[in-house]
Amino acid sequence: MSVVSDSTSLKLRVTRRTVRAVGVVELEFSAVDGADLPQWEPGAHLELRLPSALLRQYSLCGDPAARDTYVVCVQREANGRGGSVEAYDRLEVGVEVTGSAPRNHFPLVDAPEFILIAGGIGITPLKSMAEDLHRRGISWRLVYGGRSRRCMAFADELATAHPDRVTLVPQDEVGLPDLDRVVASVSQETRVYCCGPAPMLAAVTEACARAGCADRLHIERFSAADASPDTGVDSAFEVELHRSGTTLTVSADQSLLEAIRAVRPDIDSSCQEGYCGTCETRVLDGEPEHRGTLMSPDEHEAEGTMLLCVGRARSAKLVLDL
């Protein structure tokens, strides 16, 4: 069987649709031409271009060894930005969409023990992590909170398969997870992974700080952070698009993405709030100012990238690999 190239846009078809919880649907995709799909590891996400042309990212929650399918879950957010409603309502079996090869900004690091903390639809990347750790014989435990059991996808499945490792915390039954207790026993070698709504991420961050394990916390956001860094007053700067030799001025009241799209309307973006990574771009020269929450400034510097939707420049000019 042929294998789809990682650099190629994927043409996918919905092959299965299963309601997993109230307002949560599981979607299985296969390549339209039947080819094997690019490999992925737990924590990776799949970017889909929905029928309306919206770009959205969904954590993969199936089996990484299954090369013929990708599985994601979508929670319908009536008050969201439209993507989840469209995906939930319109992606029926047989519908075709395009996607990109999976990317992973939330990978598992090497460690002997893990605590996984999920809130709501944040279970999706952590489910694949738990299953991977279990297969490899690595110590792990999962604390999974949600508004109610009927809203918690995979809750019964995970608790039944791993009764000694999985703790379910439905808010309507037992309240919120006691995060201080959850992280109190974290050792110097334990890694804490958390994915969920912003209030939970903030609470876990504070609990880990109190427990002295903030440096071993890994989080993934499905929305922008509640607070952004104090970056002062914005000023204008220049940006050179290296491949075309075009130089633009980004005004003080304009985003870098807006300025670039004036000459490159094909540049993709999704969240426009600095947490999804769709517009991540390599920086060839200049000093960027990193404002997103996808990665820390140090991580961006190590990779030599920045996010166009929220990033700006500390230097008078940036040169981008565009």
Image (cartoon, helix red, strand yellow):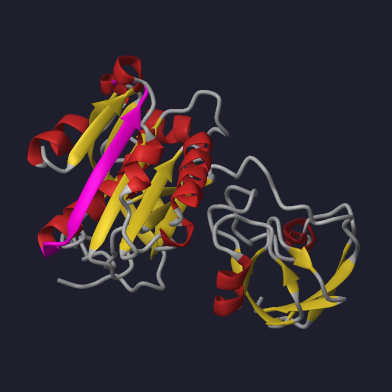
Query: Left or right: 56 with respect to 66?
Result: right
- Relative depth, front residue between 53 and 192: 192
Query: Left or right: 321 with respect to 192?
Result: right
Residue 56 visible in the displayed image: no
Coordinates of residue 21 in the picture (x, y in percent):
27, 26
Residue 132 occupies quadrant: bottom left
Residue 125 visible in the displayed image: yes
- Segment tinted magenta in the rendering: 136-148
Residue 108 colored in magenta in the image = no
Residue 319 occupies quadrant: bottom right
Residue at 72%, 59% in the rendered image: 257
Can you say which quadrant of the picture contains the N terminus? bottom left
Query: Left or right: 171 with respect to 84?
Result: left
Number of marks present in the image shown? 0
Coordinates of residue 111 in the picture (x, y in percent):
27, 67
Residue at 36%, 54% in the rendered image: 192
Residue 146 colored in magenta in the image = yes
- Relative depth, front residue between 313 and 15: 313
